[in-house]
């Protein structure tokens, strides 16, 4: 486990360093999706719990409306009974759990109860007398039979207003049934039924949850439901857990894209000022002859000492320079810097300096004049420039014509990283080259029995047949050097002989390896 954590930590540090992210940027990119996920989860959960509360309210409202409708049917049946037939009323109400009972009344008072039999209660003992004269619904805090226990009364009255019935629905039992105790988390924690200004329970008690109201379309009944806090937070954290990974991925992808775009834009400005302020410098890697082991030339490699970022890798700033149309001025700067460097050194006549040149250079209208100047300037110090064109870059017909024109000026041209890009045999037959530089990936196959190892021999054979000078890049072992020398590869370049060096180191190295 510690090794795995160390690997993840290393990957994270590599990722942060690649994008040059500060702690502030990391905090924002972690904080923003978290806040967005929480806000979105809150909105979504509010919508879900509101919808669920509405569903619970509408379901219970239908149940209540069904009970009220059935109560009217009970009342109509009860009013058809004779005044002394309380036993039949008792039998009729045996299996109706939500009902406390039925009371029959006449002009003198209540005279029959489905639960107590014959009674004698005045009319105003339950409701004001005038309220019994027409069908209606009422909520009362208690009834004579059960003190302090609320109920819903459904009044049914005959047309002559001399007889009627009051159906009593058990209020607290009904309210308790509106809440689902067996479900966790319960959607609703408290339910209050409202009718004509009265409520059930008589004194509503709500907590800190959100209250949702559901109203009946054709009556004065309203149900108030308090959303359970446990239900709310249960779905909130589910939504948060689902949204956070997606928002993290989205914010990081967009943020890194914008950051990279901004960094590239700012880095392009830095490259421009870096050229003006001479922040770029060159290192040189010797290229030795396979015949005598002496250095016959070097490859010039550009480096950038950024004033704030320190040493910037070429694979970071070269693509940005190409995209920002700064590669041509950067390459011109490299030419001038190499010219100034080698004017301080004494090398054998014909010593070659290889320069990597981007395709953009070959579409410049004054390219021939520039390279004629370059050739003459280097010739005065006994050095011959070699233009290296990376094979991964597409060469158009116009570029090939320009390259041919350069060779007519006696400027050497090489294909770099040969075998890894877009060069074809037909393209090689279109114009003549001087050098083919074999990519390191083929050199690494020496000593291995693989398909790629045979490709190396084919490339070497191609160089000999087309009279190209072969240069092997990335030579790191003596076994590789011996193999290449045995196959008449002309020049070798790699860490086996020398690493890229600054001018002072190169001067000492050339002096030490002059024999």
Image (cartoon, rainbow, N blue to C red):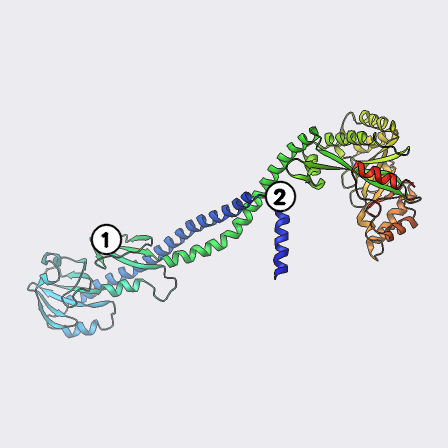
- Label 1 Cα neighbours within 10 Å, binned few <14 / some 14-19 / many ≥20: few
Give 356 or 282, whichever is nearer the viewer.
282
Task: Give me the residue at 39% from left, 58% from top.
Answer: 231
Identify the residue at the far left of this view: 108
**Residue 142: percent from the left, percent from the top?**
17, 63
- Callout 1 secondary element: loop
Q: Is residue 16 above or below residue 183?
A: above
Q: Quadrant of the N terminus?
A: bottom right
Q: Quadrant of residue 129?
A: bottom left
Task: Give me the residue at 13% from left, 57% from top.
Answer: 131
Give 237 or 512, whichever is nearer the viewer.
512
Q: Is residue 387 above or below residue 220?
A: above
Q: Is residue 162 visible?
A: no
Q: Is residue 132 above or below residue 286?
A: below
Q: Is residue 404 left or right of residue 26?
A: right
Q: Is residue 304 visible?
A: yes
Task: Give me the residue at 25% from left, 63% from top.
Answer: 67
Mark linked to residue 19: 2
Mark linked to residue 220: 1
Q: Is residue 412 left or right of residue 118?
A: right
Q: Quadrant of residue 255?
A: top right
- Label 2 Cα neighbours within 10 Å, binned few <14 / some 14-19 / many ≥20: few
Q: Quadrant of the C terminus?
A: top right
**Residue 487: percent from the left, percent from the top?**
91, 49
Q: Give yes or no for contact between labels 1 and 2 (Cβ–Cβ under 8 Å).
A: no
Q: Earlier in the sequence, mark 1 or mark 2?
A: 2
Mark closer to the observer (1, 2): 2
- Callout 2 secondary element: helix
**Residue 70: percent from the left, percent from the top?**
24, 64
Task: Give me the residue at 30% from left, 52% from top.
Answer: 213
Give 340 or 452, whichever is nearer the viewer.
340
Tag count in the figure?
A: 2
């Amino acid at each position: 486990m510690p090794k795995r954590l160390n690997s993840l930590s290393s990957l994270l540090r590599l990722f942060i360093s690649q994008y040059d992210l500060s702690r502030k940027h990391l905090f924002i990119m972690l904080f923003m999706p978290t806040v967005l996920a929480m806000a979105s989860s809150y909105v979504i959960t509010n919508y879900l719990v509101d919808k669920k509360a509405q569903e619970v309210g509408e379901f219970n409202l239908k149940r209540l409306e069904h009970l009220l409708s059935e109560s009217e049917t009970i009342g109509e049946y009860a009013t058809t009974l004779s005044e002394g037939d309380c036993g039949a009323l008792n039998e009729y109400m045996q299996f109706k759990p939500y009902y406390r009972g039925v009371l029959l009344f006449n002009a003198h008072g209540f005279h029959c109860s489905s639960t107590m039999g014959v009674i004698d209660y005045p009319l105003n003992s339950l409701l004001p007398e005038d309220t019994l004269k027409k069908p209606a619904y009422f909520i009362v805090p208690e009834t004579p039979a059960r003190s302090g226990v609320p109920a819903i009364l459904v009044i049914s009255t005959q047309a002559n207003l001399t007889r009627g019935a009051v159906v009593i629905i058990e209020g607290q039992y009904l309210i308790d049934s509106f809440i689902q105790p067996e479900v966790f988390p319960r959607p609703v924690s408290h339910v209050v039924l409202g009718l004509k200004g009265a409520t059930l329970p008589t004194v509503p008690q709500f907590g800190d949850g959100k209250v949702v109201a559901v109203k009946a379309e054709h009556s004065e009944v309203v149900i108030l439901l308090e959303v359970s806090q446990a239900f709310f937070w249960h779905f909130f954290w589910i939504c948060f857990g689902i949204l956070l990974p997606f928002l993290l991925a989205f914010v990081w992808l967009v943020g890194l894209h914008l950051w990279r775009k901004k960094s590239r834009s700012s880095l392009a400005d830095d490259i421009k000022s870096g050229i003006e302020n001479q922040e770029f410098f060159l290192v040189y890697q010797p290229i030795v002859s396979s015949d005598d082991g002496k250095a016959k030339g070097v490859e010039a490699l550009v480096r950038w000492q950024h004033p704030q970022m320190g040493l910037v890798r070429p694979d970071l700033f070269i693509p940005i320079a190409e995209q920002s149309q700064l590669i041509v001025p950067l390459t011109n700067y490299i030419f001038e810097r190499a010219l100034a460097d080698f004017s301080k050194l004494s090398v054998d006549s014909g010593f070659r300096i290889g320069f990597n040149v981007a395709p953009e250079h070959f579409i410049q209208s004054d390219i021939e004049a520039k390279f004629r100047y370059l050739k003459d300037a280097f010739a005065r110090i006994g050095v011959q420039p070699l233009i290296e064109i990376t094979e991964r870059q597409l060469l158009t017909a116009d570029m090939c014509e320009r390259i041919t024109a350069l060779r007519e000026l006696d400027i050497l041209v090489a294909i770099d990283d040969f075998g890894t890009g877009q060069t074809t045999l037909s393209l090689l037959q279109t114009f003549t080259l001087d050098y083919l530089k074999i990519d390191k990936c083929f050199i690494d196959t020496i000593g291995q029995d693989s398909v790629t190892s045979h490709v190396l021999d084919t490339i070497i054979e191609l160089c000999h047949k087309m009279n190209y000078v072969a240069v092997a890049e990335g030579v790191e072992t003596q076994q590789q050097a011996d193999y290449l020398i045995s196959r008449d590869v002309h020049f070798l370049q790699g860490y086996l002989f020398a690493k890229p060096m600054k001018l002072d180191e190169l001067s000492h190295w050339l002096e030490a390896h002059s024999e």
